[in-house]
Image: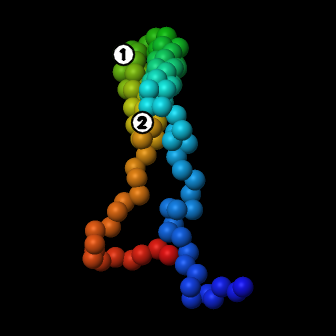
Amino acid sequence: QLISSSSHTTPPLFARFPPHHFTNTTHTTMVSHDFKTLFVGTVIFASIVCVALPFSFLCGKSAPISRVMIITAGLCCWSMWIMVYMSQMYPLEQPKRAQGEAGCSVQ
């Protein structure tokens, strides 16, 4: 039996994507795994800064500013990484449009 094209509707855009991969796990397992990863990532960034700090003593008179720059660069890179990682721990849900709200609709 043929289906007419007018009766066929495409699913909403976000309905085509698979569900979040944490849906079948318990909340405590997910949180403990995420905090282990945060701890390991923090240790890696701290160790990179600790390895780079001794090279600042080779700079002579500019050694203090070199140390500040190395620590600041490490802190900025770590904070960017942790913000991106933590934003992916609990992703935002699909926004719900209020009844009668103007705007374009994706079909």
Q: Horizontally, is 103 left or right of 40 in the view? A: left
**Measured along the vertical axis of the image, is residue 43 above or below residue 11?**
above
- Is residue 11 visible to us here? yes
Q: Pinpoint residue 98: horizontal percent, then vertical percent.
A: 28, 68
**Measured along the vertical axis of the image, is residue 61 above or below residue 14?**
above
Between 71 and 46, the one lying in front of the other is: 46
Q: Residues within 10 Å of mark 2 (few under 14, many from 20)?
A: few
Q: Pinpoint residue 107: horizontal percent, then vertical percent.
A: 50, 75
Q: Residue at x 52, y 62 (%)?
A: 15
- Is residue 34 visible to us here? no
Which residue bears the numbered disc 2? 86
Between 103 and 82, the one lying in front of the other is: 103
Q: Residue at x 51, y 66 (%)?
A: 13
Three-letter code for the amino acid on which mark 2 is drawn: Met
For residue 64, which numbered disc appears in the image? 1
Three-letter code for the amino acid on which mark 1 is drawn: Pro
Q: Pinpoint residue 80: horizontal percent, then vertical percent.
A: 42, 36
